[in-house]
Image (cartoon, rainbow, N blue to C red):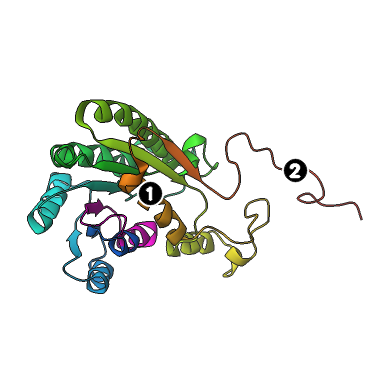
């Protein structure tokens, strides 16, 4: 019960990593605000967790006033706020040629500006409880895949936001801000995306070892387990940190260029 009696908002928690975080937080004793766009899936999660441990808020996080309404939901239902998990994200392929300014602005609105706005709205309550913020980024923040230009840039911006506020808010308000950067995670959405890109239905069972040394991709539940540490008191005074969660070293890694990955001579 590492999160006993804490109240935590988790954006984008009707599916995927956010759903796994909500379930794990409730199992650790927290009361959670489940948020997203899919009312049916969100209602199923609240029913599973119980009305005493979860409340649902369905709204586009970029809508005017949405962050404040999300905070109000937490306060009105549970009376306090101890943590915010900025998980909601727009994931869409694009490169220099295909990235229009309106598209880029939409990505930034969801992936960076909405977390910023939610932190602003939540800060008075987080300061009162000496709470924390956990931003869910991506290893793409460091550079990104060729076809994830706008998404990668948005996660890089979120990373800078986490470091900046992790310093400032901790000193001035007693509120910690950290970020985890998941690597390749096998969510339902990722399965669908890769299938839409022409990969086989069972593509995730055939991922080369250079990408998945464990022989499989990360699970949402494994990201959720890591999230609990940053939301719990056991992470103590640590703030302004960004941690990559991947099954191999990410920065500086130089994969082999031999017959383990390239065609061998016949």
Q: CA distance from mark 1 to mark 2?
A: 34 Å
Identify whether 16 is placed above or below 63.
below
Q: Which residues are magenta?
A: 1-22
Quadrant where the image shows the C terminus:
bottom right
Q: Residue at x 63, y 58 (%)?
A: 214
Q: Which one is in front, 8 or 209?
A: 8
Residues at badges 1 and 2 in contact (C-beta under 8 Å)? no
Quadrant where the image shows the N terminus:
bottom left
Which residue is tagged 1? 229
Q: Residues within 10 Å of mark 2 (few under 14, many from 20)?
A: few
Q: Residue furthest right?
A: 266
Does residue 148 appear in the picture of this structure? no
Looking at the picture, how far across and down is residue 101, in whole percent? 35, 36
Q: Which one is in front, 54 or 61?
A: 54
Looking at the picture, how far across and down is residue 146, in whole percent? 55, 41
Which residue is tagged 2? 256
Residue 141 magenta-drawn?
A: no
Looking at the picture, how far across and down is residue 105, in whole percent? 32, 38
Q: Nearer the viewer, mark 1 or mark 2?
A: 1
Does residue 58 appear in the picture of this structure? yes
């Amino acid at each position: 019960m590492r999160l006993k009696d804490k109240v935590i908002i988790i954006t984008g928690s009707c599916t995927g990593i956010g759903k796994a975080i909500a379930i794990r937080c409730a199992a650790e004793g927290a009361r959670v605000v489940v948020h997203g766009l899919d009312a049916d899936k969100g209602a199923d999660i609240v029913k599973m967790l119980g009305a005493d441990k979860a409340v649902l808020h369905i709204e586009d996080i970029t809508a005017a006033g949405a962050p404040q309404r999300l905070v109000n939901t937490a306060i009105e239902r549970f009376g306090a706020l101890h943590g915010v998990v900025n998980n909601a994200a727009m994931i869409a392929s694009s490169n220099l040629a295909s990235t229009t300014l309106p598209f880029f602005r939409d990505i930034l609105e969801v992936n960076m500006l909405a977390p910023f706005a939610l932190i602003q709205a939540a800060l008075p309550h987080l300061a009162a409880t000496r709470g924390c913020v956990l931003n869910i980024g991506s290893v793409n923040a460091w550079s990104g895949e060729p076809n994830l230009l706008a998404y990668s840039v948005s996660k890089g911006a979120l990373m800078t936001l986490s470091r900046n506020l992790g310093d400032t808010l901790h000193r001035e308000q007693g509120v910690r801000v950290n970020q985890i950067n998941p690597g390749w995670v096998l969510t339902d959405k990722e399965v669908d995306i890769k299938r839409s890109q022409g990969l086989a239905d069972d593509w995730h069972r055939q991922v080369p070892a250079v990408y998945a040394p464990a022989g499989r991709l990360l699970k949402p539940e494994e990201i959720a387990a890591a999230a609990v540490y940053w939301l719990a008191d056991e992470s103590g005074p640590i703030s302004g940190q960004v941690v990559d969660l991947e099954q191999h070293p990410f920065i500086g890694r130089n994969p082999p260029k031999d017959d383990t990955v390239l065609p061998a001579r016949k």
